[in-house]
Image: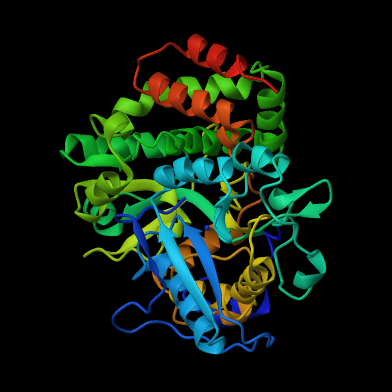
Amino acid sequence: MKWKNLLTGTLCASMLLGTLTACGGGASNQPSASPDGASPTVSAETGGGSDEAVTIKVFSNLTDRTTGQGLIEQTLFDNYMAEHSNVTIEVEALDDESYKTKFKAYAAGSSMPDLVNIWCSPSFLDEVVAANILAELDPNDYADYSFNEGSLDGVTYDGKLYGLPRNTDVLGFYYNKDLFAQYNLEIPETWDDLLIAAQTFQDAGIIPVAMDGQDKWPLAHFINCMAGTISGGDTYSIMLNSVKTGDYSDPVWNTVVTEAVAQAPVLFQTGFETTDYATAMNLFTNGQAAMFFMGSWEMSMSPDFEVGYFTMPDVDGDGEGVIGAYNGGGYAVSASSQVKDAAIDLLNYMFEPENWSKLSWENGVCMSAQDFSAYLTGSETGLQTDIINCLNNASGITGMTYNDLGSSEYKTVCEDSTVEVMSGMISIDDYFANLASIVP
């Protein structure tokens, strides 16, 4: 992925200000329909085809169809149907955990929907690809789609392409600029700076960092980001080697886990281990927390105060390291689909550069896994500017986080153990023993 040169000449011209798992509401199971009110539009030409009526069933983890990525997805479906009068798109949408549970049920049966959301990680895809659940795609179809270098690696197995990544996801801290200014705090550049800021907010009765501990994976991402500031470009290989061999003797592991466990009471809210995604985010947007640790997919948030963004401060203080970033969610087509060609055509339409990539950026929703430099408007929000600067100024990225580098069994044990060690339920030695117990 060209994280260093993601945006080139257009960035310099337009960024005059100084320069990617989303959660939603309840489940839906309904034919696709335009959300009420204004929505983004696209103009794209796709190939013709038979006039025979076709129904494409979509299984999505984007439950909110009126804002954020769900709105972009829904808009593209609506536009596709407007251009293909014989096509009906039916969407079933569930939140992440419910989605994964039902995906397994679909995979065990014979009624897998035609177009499905996927996570571009071994913990989700390895078993799915091995079970021949996903249709192979033709890489030549995407030669002109401007996918960033390396972004297709997570959906490629034995040289065959099985999906398309949706976003480039950056991990870091959303922060309340008003609160930072009120307490004369600068953006933390080192781990010690972060702890000083955290203690300042603690003393003022303000939660330093709102943390979603109930979903568990954010805590693993937090630790992975810490490791990135120490191990730099070697982070991914160190993490992958540990997951594959069960050997967690590299010093970075003990350093980051020990420090994360020790400082959790200073950094996070009381009861963070039982706080869910929405509640953690609300603590931040309601002004009860000064920071919120989460991915760039929440860049469209707009509370009643100005929001900024920074990535994990330097833990070892050497001024080197990489930021937490990877390609997360995406789409694939069911191998058993009775309308496979139509589903692939819809998928290809969605990722024509002027569709997903353009709309997601112009609407301030996320950064696509494609080069979107042509779609910079010059009127990006401050939050968009902060996030793209984090990516462009980074010396490198961590790649996929360690909780997603093994099997689905490893992911479960890893995430359960991470919340347990961070909340003091198990020892650090037991944590590594649990992780080492699951190897391929």
Percent coordinates x, y for residue 363 in the rendering: 43, 75
Q: Is residue 185 above or below residue 437?
A: below
Residue 39, by quadrant, is bottom left
Q: Residue 418 vs residue 44: left or right?
A: left
Q: Is residue 437 above or below residue 51?
A: above
Residue furthest to the left: 205
* Picture residue at 44% right of the left edge, 25% below the top: 416
Percent coordinates x, y for residue 286 in the rendering: 19, 54
Residue 99 appears in the rendering: yes
Q: Residue 115 vs residue 266: left or right?
A: right
How many numbered discs sit on the rendered protein?
A: 0
Q: Quadrant of the C terminus?
A: top right
Residue 52, by quadrant, is bottom right
Residue 377 appears in the rendering: no
Percent coordinates x, y for residue 273 in the rendering: 31, 29
Q: Nearer the viewer, residue 226 or 72?
A: 72
Q: Is residue 301 above or below residue 88?
A: above
Q: Quadrant of the N terminus?
A: bottom right
Color theme of the render:
rainbow
* Picture residue at 62% right of the left edge, 45% below the top: 322
Q: Residue 422 vs residue 232: left or right?
A: left
* Picture residue at 35% right of the left edge, 16% below the top: 424
Q: Nearer the viewer, residue 183 or 35?
A: 35
Percent coordinates x, y for residue 90 in the rendering: 45, 68
Q: Residue 277 vs residue 367: left or right?
A: left
Q: Nearer the viewer, residue 177 or 67?
A: 67
Residue 126, by quadrant, is top right
